[in-house]
Image: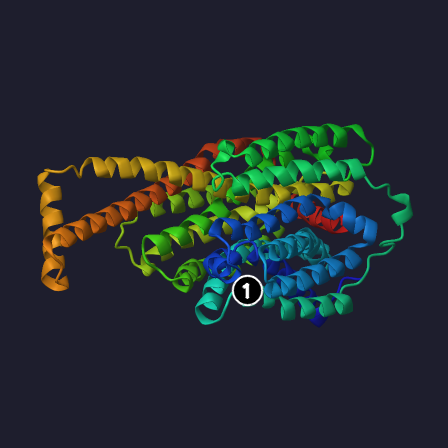
Amino acid sequence: MATPKGFARTIIVITTISAAIMELIDTSIVNVALNDMSGSLGVSIEDISWVITAYAIANVIIIPLTGFLAEYFGRKNYYIASMIIFTVASYMCGQSTSLVEIILWRFIQGVGGGALLSTSQAILFDAFEVKDRPIASGLFGMGIVLGPTLGPTLGGYIMESFSWPLIFMINIPIGILATILAFTFIDKKQGEGTKRKEIKIDYNGILLLMVGIGCLQFVLERGDADDWFSSQAIRICTGLAVVGLVSFIWYELSIDKPAVNLRVLNNRNLAFTTIFTFVVGVGLYTSVFVFPVLAQSVLGYTPLETGLTLLAPTMITVILMPVIGNLMSKGVKPIPFVIAGFLLFAGYAWYSSRVSMDVSRADFFFPFALRAIGMSMVQLPLINQAVAGLQPKDYAAGISLNNMTRQLGGAFGIAMANNYISHQYAQHRSDLVGNLTQGAAAFTERSNSVAQNFISHGGFDVGTAATKAYALISNSVDRQAHYLAYLDTFRLVALFFILVLPLVGFLRAPKKQPVNKAAAAAAIAEAH
């Protein structure tokens, strides 16, 4: 198959990166609309949060199966079908009038979206000559970082100017255009889709994967909201996740043609790269989760202001990713990039843990710039290390496992952050309240001052003014306790990145980086 040139290649690059970004945007864009959606559909916030859980479960199940499904149906056919499923489901989500309906279509949207990530990556590599494929990796890595960050920004703008259905409906013109462009400009690989009769479907492996990974994702997504193991559903799903995953691993290692080839994890580079990718998922998704909550609930930012604060410094990624890809194509080793990236991200998290409550939006530019540079340095080298040393036939399994691990890391990070914030909030509030005892000079002076203000400017009587003063002080304590809990969470993320850094010593860079890197990228595309 000839490599596309000029206009055709440009269209393929735009199509594949747009599809991947669109899929990743939908992992976070809904977060800012939950209040409006719950009110519109007449359900609680806890109920409507299932639209996030359903998408995440479908995503994490389908991603490790993309290599098998692309081989069975043909990569182009599978890619276009997934895009159509994603687009139709987006329309149906926007038209939903009940909770059950939107959860169902959100799950189907996740099934279609899960395929867009790995398959877009393979098609993008095919559009470049072997020597230029590291640049393709940089372009794709740019999308991985921008997608989750664009979600809150775009969602915030839509919610301030329009209504929540547009969050889903905006996917329709993009999906239709991407489908047409994919059908027109993406060629089928030689022999694609012709060996379906020779492929035996691993039904047992797929079922065990759905049970194990699906239940694990459910526990991570819903654990904090359902008070973890006090919930019977969480206890049951935890048991199913353990049994399902253990059975899945045992079964896939015992058959010749598994749906997910776990034997590739015998490769040390891939095994340790999945650990780093998991941590990157923790950092990427936790930062996108924690900062918006801090900014809106404590600092008083609007959703749009929050998104713009995240987006501006993250645009550094647009410049850096292709540059790093070009440097690696010229032989620069990947491991120093990984070390520098982890240190920079830890620096961002530690710096963010020290901001004051009167911080301005401009003050966040520097730490988020560190985050953008760190992520840029980490993403592409980890894509490289995931395939370094693997046989060409194993690249599809390696890259799918890597993408799944990133998603699981994000789910784990958000669950960890939720639980840690709740714990630290309770601790900080207890400590703060302990200093506000009746009769304490500082508390008496503050409450009397606030009460007098209510009497002077609000016309309240003494009793009402005192009650309002206590309520105002209580709210202030709540806000301060939440603020301190969020800062503690940033410190925890920084510690997470530092503790895993010594494992870099287990990674090995290929001796001839340009040749192996190109071969890795070529084989990824070939395997898909």
**Rendered residue at 45%/50% (across/down):** 289
In the figure, residue 493 lies in which quadrant?
A: top left
> Looking at the image, can residue 70 be seen?
yes
Q: Nearer the viewer, residue 117 or 524?
A: 117
Point out residue 39 in the picture as x, y percentages from the top left corner. 47, 60
Q: Is residue 98 placed above or below 520 in the rendered structure?
A: below
Q: Position of residue 121 (x, y in %)?
A: 67, 54
Q: Amino acid at mark 1?
A: Ile
| CA neighbours of label 1 inside 10 A, class few (<14), some (14 to 19), many (20+) | many
Residue drawn at x 64%, y 32% is 240
Would you place residue 29 above or below residue 392 in this image?
A: below
Q: Nearer the viewer, residue 252 or 56?
A: 56
Taking depth in this image into account, of 185 and 508 the one nearest to the observer is 185
Q: Position of residue 466 (x, y in %)?
A: 14, 50
Direction right: furthest residue: 197
Residue beneath disc 1: 167
Colour style of the rendered protein structure: rainbow
Label 1 sits on a secondary structure element that is helix
Is 240 displayed left or right of 410 in the figure? right
Left or right: where 472 falls relative to 268: left
